[in-house]
Amino acid sequence: MARERKAVDAATPATVRLMVRTVAALGNQPRYRANLGPFTREPKVVVVERWQAEALRADPMLEVAEAGG
């Protein structure tokens, strides 16, 4: 059974700049995801690969937004 490769759009950058922090319900506990962290209530800007961005956005305990600049 052959694996299918996903087509990667050449215009899509290899990395993404995100601002990440934990949700208030988590309190002061640190959170680690996608080989990154610790994330806390203090916003942290990270430059990540696409697979890491997907993992961070999928975590309901993290608030993730595009970071400018």
Image (spheres, rainbow, N blue to C red):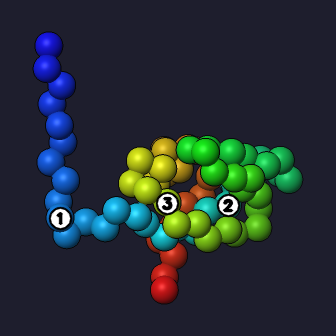
Circles 3 and 2 in contact, beta carbons < 8 Å: no
Residue under label 2, please give it: 21
Of the pair 14 and 54, the residue shown nearer to us: 14
- Residue 21: x percent and y percent? 67, 61
What is the residue that sits farthest to the top in this orientation? 1
- Residue 3: x percent and y percent? 18, 25
Residues at marks 1 and 2, CA–CA distance in whole angstroms: 30 Å
User: Residue visible at 17% across and 37% down?
Assistant: 5
Residue type beneath disc 3: Val
Answer left or right for 6 relative to 68.
left
Q: What label sits on residue 10 in the rendered view?
A: 1
User: Residue visible at 83% across and 47% down?
Assistant: 29
Residues at marks 3 and 2, CA–CA distance in whole angstroms: 15 Å
Residue type beneath disc 2: Arg
Mark 3 or mark 2: which is in front?
Answer: 3
Residue under label 3, please give it: 48
How many marks are shown on the rendered structure? 3
Residue type beneath disc 1: Ala
Crowdedness of circle 1 by 10 Å Cα count: few (<14), some, many (20+)?
few
Residues at marks 1 and 3, CA–CA distance in whole angstroms: 17 Å
**SS of the residue at dot 2?**
strand
**SS of the residue at dot 1?**
loop
User: Residue visible at 76% across and 62% down?
Assistant: 41
Quarter of the figure with the N terminus: top left
Crowdedness of circle 3 by 10 Å Cα count: few (<14), some, many (20+)?
some
Q: Earlier in the sequence, mark 1 or mark 2?
A: 1
- Residue 39: x percent and y percent? 72, 56
